[in-house]
Image (cartoon, helix red, strand yellow):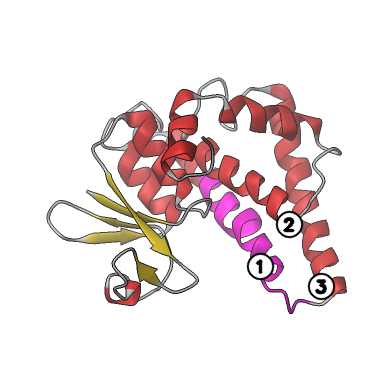
């Protein structure tokens, strides 16, 4: 399998999952600013959507969208990072992944543009804050989003939380999130991913 990624982007979540699961995944770096691969070729020819992640399976077929790729990878080793498909626990995990994708991930959308007016930025950050409050309440009761065990939802949320550094969003109102961020960052597979992406030494 090949995973097309950009350092620190949402593609980092499946990259973490692959390391956690010990899956043989070839990571291929994409320059999203240029939509180009290391050899200068056009990434749009690989993925017409133009963004990461993209997972190319051994048969040449592809999957995109972080929350789908995360589930595909988790199901290569059932029970390790996700409950079995069809169980109530899996539906709850899928609910969390959908919330992260639509309410947190997409909540950052306008923040990436330098042309976004200050009042729009503030409104977006305030909306993210309401989502952070909900998730903080969960993480004040348990070590990970779904309970005692690390899952693919945690790989995803860890990446999204790290974007607060890029956008200078102060997490001090949510100490449970800061503790969680440090707890996930300390995992060996997470450190291995950060090193592989050139984000830590």
Residue for badge 3:
120
Which is in the foreground here, disc 1 or disc 3? 1
The residues colored magenta run: 95-116
Q: Residues within 10 Å of mark 1 (few under 14, many from 20)?
A: few
Mark identifier at residue 167: 2
Question: Which comes before the other along the chain, label 1 or label 2?
Answer: 1
At 67% from the left edge and 61% from the top edge, which residue is drawn?
A: 108
- Is 198 placed left or right of 75 in the picture? right
Nearer the observer, 27 or 55 = 27
Spatial CA span between label 2 and label 3: 14 Å
Does the segment drawn in magenta span residue 123?
no
Nearer the observer, 191 or 154 = 191
Q: Is residue 33 visible?
A: yes
- Is 110 placed left or right of 24 in the picture? right
Secondary structure that dominates the magenta span = helix
Mark identifier at residue 170: none
Does the segment drawn in magenta span residue 100?
yes
At 32% from the left edge and 70% from the top edge, which residue is drawn?
A: 47
Badge 1 element:
helix
Question: Which comes before the other along the chain, label 1 or label 3?
Answer: 1
Badge 2 element:
loop
Question: Which comes before the other along the chain, label 2 or label 3?
Answer: 3
Which is in the foreground here, disc 2 or disc 3? 2
């Amino acid at each position: 399998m090949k995973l097309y990624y950009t350092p620190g982007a949402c593609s980092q979540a499946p990259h973490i999952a692959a390391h956690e699961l010990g899956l043989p995944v070839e990571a291929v770096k994409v320059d999203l600013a240029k939509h180009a691969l290391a050899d200068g070729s056009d990434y749009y020819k690989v993925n017409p959507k133009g963004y990461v992640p993209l997972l190319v399976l051994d048969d040449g077929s592809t999957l995109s969208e972080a929350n789908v790729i995360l589930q595909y990878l988790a199901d290569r080793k059932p029970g390790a990072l996700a409950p079995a498909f069809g169980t109530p626990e899996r539906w709850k995990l899928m609910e969390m992944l959908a919330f992260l994708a639509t309410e947190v991930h997409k909540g950052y959308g306008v923040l990436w543009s330098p042309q976004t007016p200050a009042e729009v930025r503030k409104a977006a950050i305030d909306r993210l804050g309401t989502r952070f409050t909900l998730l903080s309440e969960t993480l004040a009761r348990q070590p990970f989003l779904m309970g005692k065990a690390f899952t693919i939802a945690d790989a995803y949320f860890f990446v999204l939380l790290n974007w607060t550094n890029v956008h200078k969003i102060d997490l001090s109102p949510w100490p449970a999130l800061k503790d969680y961020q440090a707890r996930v960052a300390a995992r060996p597979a997470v450190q291995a991913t950060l090193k592989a992406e050139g984000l830590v030494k």
